[in-house]
Image (spheres, rainbow, N blue to C red):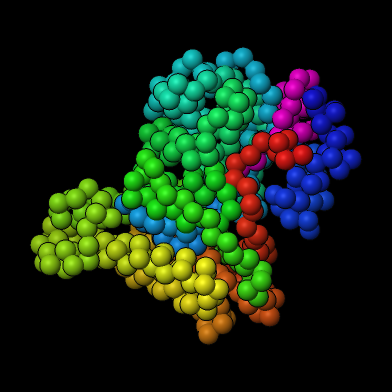
Amino acid sequence: MSAQTLLKKIQDGAYDGALAALYGTDNVAQQRARYAGAVEGFAATFGGEGDLLLFSAPGRTEIGGNHTDHNYGRVLAGSVNLDVIAVVRPAAGLIRMQSEGYPIIEVDTAELLPVESEKNGSASLIRGTAARFADLDYAIGGFDAYATSNVLKGSGLSSSAAFEVLIGVILNHLYNEGRVSPVEIAQIAQYTENIYFGKPCGLMDQMASSVGNIITIDFADPAQPIIEKVEVDFAATGHALCIVDVGGDHADLTHEYAAVPGEMKAVAASLGVPVLRQTTMEALLANITDLRRQHGDRAVLRAIHFLQENERVLEQVAALRAGDFEGFKKRIIASGNSSFQYLQNVYATGDVKEQSMSLALALAQRLLEGAGAWRVHGGGFGGTTQNFVPLDKLEEFKTTIEQVFGAGSCHVLNIRPYGGVCVDKLV
């Protein structure tokens, strides 16, 4: 439908049911205005004629398994009600993407080899996704898109994965009749970020964004990850899920992230396996003297974190399924302590004066100890913390945090039941 027709349908409430499913009933009016603004942005950029469609891909919250996926570990994650949305129209072989507030990007689908100058930029994600679709014998084509995102960039909610999944869902819907599965879209997105963007990430971010809901994933065989839903109603536990944006930006810290899997895999190689999932704590301890000499203490500590965190995910899932939220919170705190002490991803070593995440964790412990839980969230190095806050402490927690880190820094989120999706399919 044209931009004018689509805009009227949104404003008249035709999409309200879909918006409620994605964002919760309390957020429908806000999202209606957001989607209407995106349609207007599309029309101003590309013109309003043609068959326009709406797409969405969510950010994700990592609940358990901090930096385990890239070594074939286990994770617990969920999609959240912050997302990147796009108004899209099919076109000839050129992909034109206008992200709100950024220069327009153009990618020719006939030119799909990596471009060195595009690394670490959005154009590489578009080109890489199209290239991988073509490699796998899926159809590709052009489109015009106007996108806007409320996934906090550099926040640990994984804005890059949401963007990659969005491109994959668009190509899937426009040119492949939806036959590319959410799992395969996630795998395509990971390939794109590894090869075209230049970041050696694991698969958790893309999988949580693509599949949606709360899931636990076992990456023992990354080509065929085992994905299970974990049925839990966080609201019924009397806790809110709060993500605190501490104001850091990890966009220029790719080297810090790359060092984590690099050091873990180096330790694994010395133990005769490619990844830590294929060894044991007993093997590590039996060889710890040689490992320290070969790789240094930090690498050994990071390997210890992996081996303990991988088992901790099983304990978190078991606690949630048993309705033992207190046991779950204890393991969240243990995960956070391990990340701080062993994994060492709370602040960047190149700027030790900047420790905003450490401060946020200290405040959370003071406010929540004995009642809630707190931990580093996502990749770390100055992005966000994750907090499970009892509802009777939510106002105090939010007020205290925002006095330190600024208004709007504490985000109370919902888990959303859908991953990447063509919104029109939900109407």
- 398 vs 166, nearest the viewer: 166
User: Would residue 96 be visible to someone looking at this image?
Assistant: no
Magenta span includes 25: no
Rendered image quadrant of residue 288: bottom left
Q: Is residue 411 left or right of residue 249?
A: right
- 278 vs 347, nearest the viewer: 278
Magenta span includes 55: yes
Q: Quadrant of the C terminus?
A: top right
Q: Is residue 261 left or right of residue 103?
A: left
Question: Residue shown at 80%/41% (left/top)?
Answer: 15
User: Would residue 63 be visible to someone looking at this image?
Assistant: yes
Q: Quadrant of the N terminus?
A: top right
Q: Is residue 369 above or below residue 227?
A: below
Q: Which residues are magenta?
A: 39-57
Question: Residue shown at 48%/40% (left/top)?
Answer: 183
Q: Is residue 414 left or right of residue 11?
A: left
- 422 vs 361, nearest the viewer: 422
**Picture coordinates of residue 155 (x, y %)?**
53, 55
Question: Residue shown at 46%/50% (left/top)?
Answer: 227
**Picture coordinates of residue 75 (x, y %)?**
43, 57
**Picture coordinates of residue 246 (x, y %)?**
54, 63
Q: Is residue 5 above or below residue 224?
A: above
**Picture coordinates of residue 138 (x, y %)?**
49, 23
Farthest residue in the front direction?
Answer: 322
